[in-house]
Image (spheres, rainbow, N blue to C red):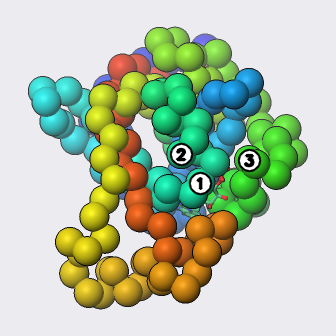
């Protein structure tokens, strides 16, 4: 069952989870459903729409899926998160295997977009990409540029690497808790 909520009533939950192990970003395309851990994200309003902005480095498999499908779900833990899942989804690439199956995650039929949620991370935002924009590393202040974009680290590195982030602005078209 899905208990509908107002996403903005859960801003504190979302912004608390992001820097404390992260949340999941689930995407689909090429016959696959994939999930990855994200620690960065913004929730707010632009173009008169409620939006969640995810920042995905160019080399991630997720980036390919997002570009193909234009939809994603954000899957936020309620209560203590399963840190084993967040660690694995944040270090393995969907290019190398089916993380959802390996981690025993349960997909939940979506309500509006074509991308499922994840029962074990029940606070769900269904999002439709309304804008995507590659960030300009040269516009960054020196400290974040040097810390987060080491140009000698290949883009296959699951952590910081040479790749810029692409900002995916997802209109939040539905929000609920899976119960
Ligand atoms: C706690 C945590 C937070 C992360 N946050 C982000 C993020 O915001 N953006 C990003 O591109 N990668 C982030 N990553 C790295 C990706 O989750 C990781 O590279 C993952 O393997 C990519 O999966 P994919 O290739 O299946 O898309 C994070 C990893 C961890 C462990």
Image quadrant occupied by the C terminus: top right
Q: Are marks 1 and 2 in contact (CB under 8 Å)?
A: yes
Question: Quarter of the image holding residue 101?
Answer: top right
User: Does residue 38 appear in this view?
Assistant: yes
Instruction: Give how far apart the Cα atoms at labels 3 and 2 are.
Output: 11 Å
Q: Is residue 70 above or below residue 53?
A: above
- Badge 2 density bin: few <14, some 14–19, many ≥20, Cα 10 Å: some
Instruction: Give how far apart the Cα atoms at labels 1 and 2 are.
Output: 5 Å
Q: Which quarter is ligand 1 in?
A: bottom right
Q: Are marks 3 and 2 in contact (CB under 8 Å)?
A: no
- What SS does tag 2 mark? helix
- Badge 1 density bin: few <14, some 14–19, many ≥20, Cα 10 Å: some
- What SS does tag 1 mark? loop
User: Does residue 13 appear in this view?
Assistant: no
Which residue is identified by label 2? 63
**Could you tell me residue 146's position as x and y percent?**
38, 86
Mark 3, ligand 1, within 8 Å: the answer is: yes
Q: Residue at x 58, y 36 (%)?
A: 65
Q: Is residue 55 left or right of residue 103?
A: left
Q: Residue at x 47, y 12 (%)?
A: 112
- What SS does tag 3 mark? helix
Which residue is identified by label 3? 94
**Could you tell me residue 41's position as x and y percent?**
37, 53
């Amino acid at each position: 069952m899905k208990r509908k909520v107002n996403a903005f009533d859960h801003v504190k939950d979302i912004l608390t989870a992001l820097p404390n192990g992260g949340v999941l970003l689930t995407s689909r395309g090429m016959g696959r459903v994939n999930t990855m851990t994200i620690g960065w994200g913004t929730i707010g309003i632009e173009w008169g729409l409620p939006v969640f902005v995810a920042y995905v480095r160019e080399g991630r498999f997720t980036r390919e899926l997002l570009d193909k499908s234009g939809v994603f779900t954000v899957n936020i833990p309620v209560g203590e998160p399963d840190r084993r899942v967040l660690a694995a989804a944040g270090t393995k690439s969907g290019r190398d295997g089916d993380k959802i199956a390996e981690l025993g995650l349960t997909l939940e039929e979506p309500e509006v977009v074509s991308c499922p949620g994840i029962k074990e991370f029940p606070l769900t935002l269904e999002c439709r990409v309304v804008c995507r924009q590659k960030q300009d590393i040269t516009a960054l202040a020196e400290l974040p540029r040097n810390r987060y974009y080491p140009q000698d680290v290949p883009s296959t590195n699951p952590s910081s690497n040479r790749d810029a982030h692409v900002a995916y602005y997802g209109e939040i078209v539905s929000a609920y808790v899976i119960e």
